[in-house]
Image (spheres, rainbow, N blue to C red):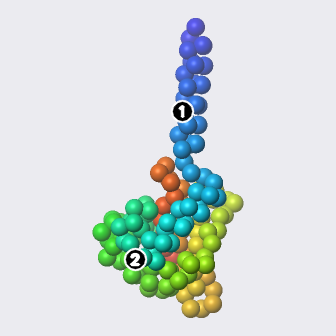
Amino acid sequence: MKKQILIALLVLHIIGAAQTFAKIPQTADSIDAFWAKFKAAVAAGNKAAVAQMTIFPVTMPYGVRAIKTKAELASRFKQVFHGETNAAKCFESAKPQKEPKRPREFTVGCDNGSGQEVIIYRFVLTKSGWKFKAFDNINE
């Protein structure tokens, strides 16, 4: 009897975990839908919408302090999206890049005027969907 109860509880746990996992968008379609919303918000300068699609703290390049809150992102919006690159212009044609070793992340690279995509925006899959997580200049 104990064994049957344990098996039943295990099955319920597995089903619950599977249902939770299934709620997390993981397809290329979900990345594309998120990316369309995110780049539109950046292009419009919609700081509130970008903040809603962000997980804090936002990691910054070496020596630059992280962005810890929505208010701080709003005040540093220009630094992140219009400082080292024109993100709105870059995002018009940029495509999310998935890394096989990191299936729950994607990046978008932008040119900083050097002809190379050295400005990197990193996004992660969370329980509530895709979120902006990091901004980096790989030359620094």
Q: Position of residue 114 (x, y in %)?
A: 59, 91
Mark 2 residue element: loop
Residue 73: image quadrant is bottom left
Q: Is residue 4 above or below residue 107?
A: above
Q: Position of residue 132 (x, y in %)?
A: 48, 65
Q: CA distance from mark 2 to mark 1?
A: 39 Å
Q: Amino acid at mark 1?
A: Gly
Q: What residue did someone put label 1 on?
A: 16
Number of numbered discs visible in the structure rendering: 2
Q: What residue did someone put label 2 on?
A: 45
Residue at image x 63%, y 90%?
A: 115
Decide if residue 56 is in sight here: no
Q: Is residue 50 above or below residue 10?
A: below
Residue at image x 49%, y 49%?
A: 127
Residue at image x 55%, y 77%?
A: 91
Give 135 or 74, whichever is nearer the viewer. 74
Decide if residue 112 is in sight here: yes
* Numbered disc in front, either 2 or 1: 2
Mark 1 residue element: helix
Q: Is residue 82 above or below residue 74?
A: below
